[in-house]
Image: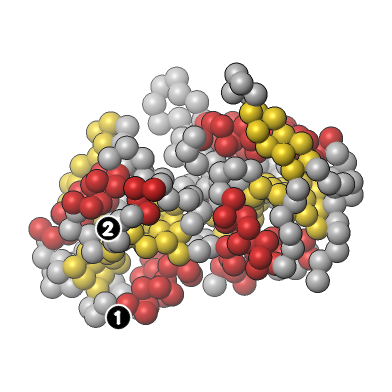
Amino acid sequence: MFDDKFKIFSGSANVKLAEDICRFLGVPRGKSVLREFSDGEIYFQVLENVRGADVFVVQSCSHPVDRHLMELLLMIDAFKRASAWRITAVIPYYCYARQDRKDKPRVPISAKLVADLLETAGASRALTLDLHAPQIQGYFNVPVDHLFAAPVLVEHFKKLNLGPFTVVSPDAGGVERARYFAKKMDAPLAIVDKRRVDVDVSEVVHLIGDVRGRAALVVDDIIDTAGTLVKTAEALLREGATRIFAAATHAVLSGPAVERLCASPIEQVVVTDSIPLSEAAARVDKIKVLSVAELLARGIRSIHEETSISELFI
């Protein structure tokens, strides 16, 4: 049972996930007003006392990215000025994470800037889920708890009884994630060697590993335009894979993603509710959504009770 100094609020990005988290913890969602002026400026007001409270702000920075990020910053600032004891930004989907380094001349390190903005606004710590680059934790000067959706996804695929299959990483950067899946499911690992030729455009060069005569499970953290995923699936079929499945934490699904997935040879695409699906995506039978509400709720409870969070990584 929690006391009245434990508060969970949410922005507009993923209200259902926030409500599911509150339901799991047995606490009401905090009362607030969030609207916009006629010129698009955001207005936020806390409608209950948070002085001395341990406040958690649930907000995925998904589309429209900049609006949801700005909402989060304004909410954190409001709680800081209302004398909250601690403010934890719960960010199931961390925006700008793919811009985590200077890979070209004269470009920003956007992921670092977002971390700076959150700290400047007044965040005491952050709770995130499957960062695109785990080293982004180092961009913060406050504690960051980085959870993984893999246990939720692995449990689903264990129940499918796929027969002989191979776990596939769609690029070298996702090998650790795919290796976790392979280890937990006692399956071999394969890696796709791809070359990025432009923003959101990549081409498959060759496959490292064996998928011939086996099902293939492609594991990634984000599905954005789905171009890489579909090309990977087609390459796996050419290499002799019999069936293709995909798993990812964050279903960004922008641009032609839904159409590409519908036309692809992938039998099932399993994602989480870190980002709410669009209406078009929700109508696609091959896209299955698993909830991470319990995972995030347990993380929030561990932070509030000052207990170990490491058991959530198993």
State the residue at coordinates (57%, 37%): 68
Inspect this view and state whether residue 194 appears: no
Location of residue 218 with respect to 94 vertically, above or below: below
| Residue density around tag 2, few if under 14, some if 14–19, many if 20 or more, within 10 Å | many
On residue 161, which mark appears?
1
- Between 182 and 28, the residue placed more toward the observer is 28
Mark 2 residue element: strand
In the image, taking residue 156 as reference, residue 100 lies left or right, namely right
| Residue density around tag 1, few if under 14, some if 14–19, many if 20 or more, within 10 Å | few
Inspect this view and state whether residue 40 appears: yes
Q: Earlier in the sequence, mark 2 or mark 1?
A: 1
Q: CA distance from mark 2 to mark 1?
A: 22 Å
What residue is shown with label 2? 191
Picture coordinates of residue 229, whole percent (x, y): 27, 51
In the image, taking residue 313 as reference, residue 224 lies left or right, namely left
Q: Quadrant of residue 176?
A: bottom left
Mark 1 residue element: loop
In the image, taking residue 208 as reference, residue 186 lies left or right, namely right
Picture coordinates of residue 18, whole percent (x, y): 62, 55
Q: For the residue marked with disc 1, what is the amino acid?
A: Asn
Picture coordinates of residue 265, whole percent (x, y): 17, 58
Picture coordinates of residue 198, whole percent (x, y): 28, 31
Q: Quadrant of residue 243?
A: bottom left
Q: For the residue marked with disc 2, what is the amino acid?
A: Ile
- Between 182 and 264, the residue placed more toward the observer is 264
Q: Quadrant of residue 169?
A: bottom left
On residue 202, which mark appears?
none
